[in-house]
Image (spheres, rainbow, N blue to C red):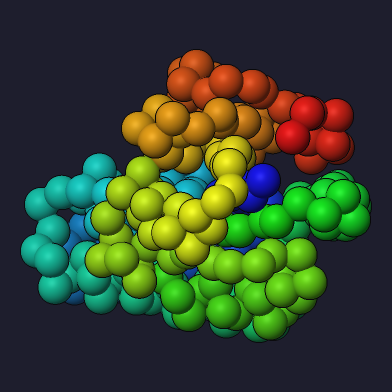
Amino acid sequence: MVLIFDYDGTLHNTKHIYGCAFRSAYDMLVKEGYAEERVYTDEDVSKYLGVSAPDMWKDFMPQLADEVWQRASMIIGGEMIEGVLNGKAQLFDGITDMLDELKARGLKMAILSNCRHAYMDAHRKALGLDKWFDSYFCAEDYDFIPKEDIFPFIKEKYPDESFIMIGDRASDFRVGEVNGLKTVGCAYGFGTEEERKLCDIIVNSPKELLSLEW
């Protein structure tokens, strides 16, 4: 059995580093005349947590040229990595105990995230993720194709295993829908109640994951 975890919103409480990074990128857009001055709170932008960069900008400012939103995205990514390396990244309460127990049970665990490779590497270093996870699948390494299309690469790495997808957003649950996997929705993350209608099981805390039958 391989447990596939989403990262932001499932393991990592991204709110601690995302808001400031988003506002820095938006300030650049305002200064260069691409956007009107406005203050975005952490709550305002939390709906984009766990969403791939292309999809986020398509929803937020679809009129931006690729070159412009890509520069803004690099600002966000760079500042988030800096925040991670400066000790600001935080896993949700209860995550480390949950991962310790699942590892002790002999379960294999992987991360499937819409993030960039450098972002995940920063988290691996800062939070010691390698003591729990066997492999990492970052969307950037697959040209930001949807998660459900990345899953076959995971299956190729673990050809004789069964899988469960654990996440908080619709993009996580589509992995299960398209590939015939059971999905677990984390209600403590950043997804909506509407998104969680797509999953098979809902948990309200990391601890509840330990009571599931794997």
> Could you say which is closer to the camera, residue 12 or residue 35?
12
Residue lying at 50% horizontally and 17% vertically, measured from the top left: 197
Figure quadrant of residue 138: bottom left
Residue lying at 29% horizontally and 60% vertically, measured from the top left: 144
Residue 113: horizontal and vertical position, in percent? 48, 57
Q: Is residue 99 left or right of residue 73?
A: right
> Could you say which is closer to the camera, residue 120 or residue 150?
150
In this rendering, does residue 68 appear at all? Answer: yes
- Which image quarter holds the C terminus? top right
Q: Is residue 185 above or below residue 34?
A: above
> Could you say which is closer to the camera, residue 184 or residue 103?
103
Q: Is residue 32 above or below residue 200?
A: below
Q: Is residue 15 above or below residue 191?
A: below
> Could you say which is closer to the camera, residue 166 or residue 66?
166
Q: Is residue 101 left or right of residue 68?
A: right
Residue 120: horizontal and vertical position, in percent? 55, 72
Residue 189: horizontal and vertical position, in percent? 63, 39
Q: Is residue 31 left or right of residue 116?
A: left
Residue lying at 26% horizontally and 66% vertically, measured from the top left: 143
In this rendering, does residue 25 appear at all? Answer: no
Q: Farthest front residue? A: 160
Q: How many marks?
A: 0
Q: Is residue 138 above or below residue 99?
A: below
Residue lying at 13% horizontally and 66% vertically, measured from the top left: 66
